[in-house]
Amino acid sequence: MSLPFYLEVGSEEIPDWMIVPALNHLQDAFQSWLDANQIGGRVTRADATPRRLVLRAEGLRARQEDSTEILMGPPKSAGEGAARGFAKKNGTTVDQLQIEMTPKGEYWKFVHAVPGRNTADLLSEALPGLILGVPWPKTMYWTGKNGPRWIRPIRWLVALLGDEVVPFEIANVKSGGRERSQGHRLLGARGVIVSADERREKIEREIAALLESTGLRVKPDPDLLHTLVYITEYPTPILGMFEQQYLRLPREVLSTVMRHHQKYFSVENLATGELARNFIAVMNTDADPDGLVRQGNERVLRARFNDARFFWEVDQKKNLEDRLPDLAHVTFQAKVGSYLEKTHRVVALVKELGGNQDAQRAALLAKCDLTTEMVKEFTDLQGIVGGLYAREQGEPPEVWRAIYEHYKPLSMEDSIPSTPEGRIVALADKLDTLRECFRVGLVPSGSKDPFALRRAAQGVIRILVEGNIVLPFAETGELREFLLDRIRYYFREVRGFRYDEVNAVLASGIRDLPDVAARLEALRDVRPTEDFEPLAASFKRIANILRQAEFRDGGAVDAGLLEDGPERDLYADFNRVRETIGTSDYRPALEAIATLRPAVDRFFDKVLVNAPDERIRRNRLTLLCNLLTEFSAIADFSEIAPSNI
Amino acid sequence: MKLYYQDAVARLKGYWAERGCIIQEPYDLEVGAGTMAPETFLRVLGPRPYRVAYVQPSRRPADGRYGENPNRLYKHQQLQVILKPSPDDIMDQYLGSLRAIGIDLARHDIKFEEDNWESPTLGAWGIGWQVMLDGMEITQFTYFQQCGGIDLDLVPAELTYGLERLVAFLQNVDSVYDIEWAPGFTYRQVRFDDELQFSMYNFEMADVAMLWKLFELHEAEGHRLLKIGGPPLPAYDQVLKCSHLFNLLDSRGAISVTERVGVIGRVRRLAVGVAEIWNKLEQPQAGGEVAA
């Protein structure tokens, strides 16, 4: 007979962002426990709201399967006494023992059937550990010092195997039947939508209904939606409004206030994309019959916007440039120094990178917004606020846009700054962060990267490649290795080049990153052509021959020593291709190199490299060496692994 | 029926008195929050149950806005409730307190959003939520875990109601200054002068050299008391004095970012020292009633 199982752990409100990982862990741990204890059954559903984690399983056996246990005893040679002792210890008699032949001789053994235990008993014993074993980022105790720890106090427990309660206790809470389950705080039992998918759909469906034929749409925000799904048990969106006058504040500020402080969706005009004077709030209840919830939210937003306006006005009393000396008191990093020092380094670096007057000006003002009230209140708006203030204070677009965008790209999905000035400032800022942190030994290790240096490195690489900035790759030491690692990651994982292509191109050296990208693209284009991979295989063979002969001396080929036929033909081809690629782009160059294939093949077919005559042998090695070095500047073909076709 | 500011306060006090709380008066030194009053900071230590509720005027010099901002105040009023240990139905009791001041929860939206509380100055932290009513934070709800760097024997629930916000909500006004405090008196009439005058003083006039001097005097007195093992209550007064002076210096812009951590550390050392003495006296083996 197989039984269904139901578990509900009720608690006070769990932080939204922790719920999904916790539920996944509980589900996996429970399934593993079922499997390990031969109870059978599978978890068929796992659900969660802020106040409950719910597991449902089907097909559990009422009793664990019986099993056989074999206990090895003393060697037969130890005598009757030892056997009796062994039997007694296991609650049996010698006549119930058996003999086992082992390589070491005959041994007593006791084979006995272990009856399976009741699943309910096993669950009673295991559930407290399984529930308390959920790993939370930060736990608390609530029954007193040394009490159990969980994310928030556990307030009820429902555990049913079939129709029977599985009895157990955690923190003075005894498990019970479904009547123990508390409903929604305000709506009671009818007010819990236990499925996160249903809650998400309800939010989306009702937002669509609220905005239908208004010419408005919600600014998509999957992270916010996720948060709202997991801070509600019965989500219901409402549409609110704010006064026209607040639209005079920058939309970046309005959106941040709405999203980060109030968890509201911003609403945009469908036609123009402009921010509308509306917002969507999501309640944790079923309705707002008197509009009180809407009014309340509107009033709070008004107060928040008033604050933002206050910050804006106060901040305008001191220009960005006048704030520069204040940066001496803002620590960039304790070992590295202040933001003022950083600013001076970045300005110098911008200059060194060929940044124009506007870029240098932007670099000078870029960090000044760190001392403004607006950024102190809305830290996510750093850079953006600086840019907006610079515009307000009459800086030209080249300058304020560069400030505005200098933290970009903030993620893989984010774009790089849109202007040349912005790119140079963003590049110099990140490069400086990397160089200084590495200089004082703040090197990321494993999952630890408190200064987000990987993101900074990724930003540097993307700005160089996607911004087509030709900057010699001159870093040294640990930072060089770190950057090389990120460069490989970028070209492989982000750009989708194959690992051997990346290795081949990087093995030929790095002049600058746009050049690496161009070589990779050419390589990827030419790779599928018929002659390319066989030629690459031949290059690998050449590299091996030269290595075995320990031949490094390039020198010039003595044409007089060449044998007519394949050897002289190859030399002629070599000269032809060398002339062709002298001035051409990477792709035609690679195509030209690929045309060497027949000559190379014939050479290896007909010509013995290890000629008895030492002078001829050396001349042949010289020819091969020239071939390899001349044509490995784009990519080291010997790194190319043959494709499986 | 109109619920005046003072009515709301009285009802909340009455509600918690019915649930076994001592109704205390505000602590009579400057504090930044109800948590800092010894009724919370010291009473949460040790194994003895305690229940108390009090209004605590809380001074935050840097939040002053010369009476111009409708929601930010140099000094606001908190209703502080400590239930040690926390009862199992604390959330329901809390929701009941909102009903007691006339909030019909069926017509509103209430959420408990993660907000852990930490005071580096007091070496204290707890786990909890900000309680959002129709999108407005009305209460900070914290299960204390540590105070003065000491793990707490019993876990108290701390409820901190922001009274101005709550009553502005009840009276449906946009500015705290429009709250009707009592028949014929608005919040503006009662408190505007404080806000204006103290904003002027805190931001523009307070004598920085004198503040530093006072800070050092109170700090020294605190350490002198700690050295001789207490008594903890007068020593704790020195902590509160230092904390308030720090806040004043901060609002005068006299503490640089680099100095900040160091000065907070100085106040914390005092606070931790006091907590240790108090906690020791509270433990059963101490046998004394010194701290009672």
Image (cartoon, coloured by chain):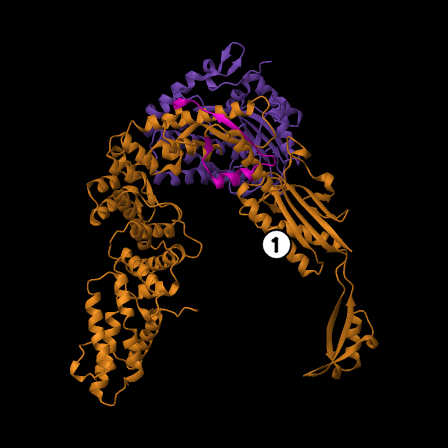
Left or right of residue B274, residue A307 in this image: left
The residue under the point 66% across, 24% down is B18
The residue under the point 25% across, 35% down is A397
Left or right of residue A543, residue A186 in this image: right
- Give the total number of marks visible in the rendering: 1
Residue stretch rendered in magenta on the structure: A216-245
**Disc 1 on helix, strand or loop?**
helix
Q: Chain of mark 1?
A: A
Left or right of residue A511, residue A298 in this image: right
**What type is the residue that disc 1 sits on?**
Asp
Instruction: Say if residue A43 shows up in the picture.
Output: yes
Residue nearest the observer in this picture, A456 or A368: A456
Residue nearest the observer in this picture, A133 or B49: A133
Relative height, residue B177 to residue B96 (above, below): above
Relative height, residue A386 to residue A617 (above, below): above
Image quadrant in which the C terminus of chain A is located: bottom left
The location of residue A50, given as percent across then percent down, is: 59, 40
Relative height, residue B134 to residue A60 (above, below): above
Residue furthest to the bottom in view is A612
The residue under the point 53% across, 20% down is B167
The location of residue A386, given as percent across then percent down, is: 31, 35
The location of residue A334, given as percent across then percent down, is: 34, 46
Quarter occupied by residue A324: top left
Residue nearest the observer in this picture, A368 or A473: A473
Quarter occupied by residue B61: top left
Chain A shade:
orange
The location of residue A467, given as percent across then percent down, is: 29, 49
Assess whether residue A299 is covered by the magenta stretch. no
The residue singled out by tag 1 in the image is: A28
The letter of the purple chain is B
